[in-house]
Amino acid sequence: MTKAIEQAADGDVWSETSSFYLVNSTRNSVGLKDEITAAVALQDGDVLLVINLSKTKGHATSGLAKKALFKKLIEQR
């Protein structure tokens, strides 16, 4: 997944060992999520969350177990 995220970024990539990344991209949240998930075989338990920090309603997910709770929390931003 790390390589897919780095290849999907349009420029610098910042990451930590916790697999938390900040990237610039010209794609929207869904487009970036789709590009990353298409480039890697997700394993059981893998979760991908893409949040557009420049917009209050931009996000996309893959593999969330508690979708209702996530939706409740993300809509508070």
Image (tube, rainbow, N blue to C red):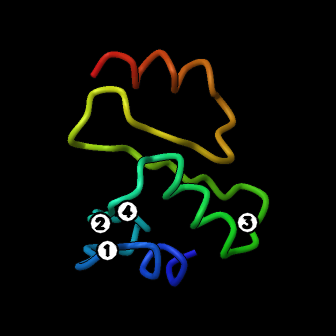
**Disc marking residue 10:** 1
- Dot 1, crowdedness within 10 Å: few (<14), some or many (≥20)? few
Quadrant holding the C terminus: top left
Q: Which comes before the other along the chain, label 1 or label 4?
A: 1
Q: Amino acid at mark 4?
A: Phe
Q: Name the residue nearer the viewer: 64 or 35.
A: 35
Q: Which secondary structure, mark 3?
A: loop
- Real-space Cα separation, disc 1 to disc 4, in angstroms: 17 Å
Of badges 1 and 2, the one in the foreground is: 1
Q: Which comes before the other along the chain, label 1 or label 2?
A: 1
Of badges 4 and 2, the one in the foreground is: 2
Residue 33 percent location from the top left of the image: 55, 55
Q: Is residue 32 left or right of residue 21?
A: right
Please say if the residues under marks 1 and 4 sit with CB atoms less than 8 Å apart: no
Q: Is residue 63 above or below residue 76?
A: below
Q: Which comes before the other along the chain, label 3 or label 1?
A: 1
Of badges 3 and 2, the one in the foreground is: 2
Residue 27 percent location from the top left of the image: 41, 56
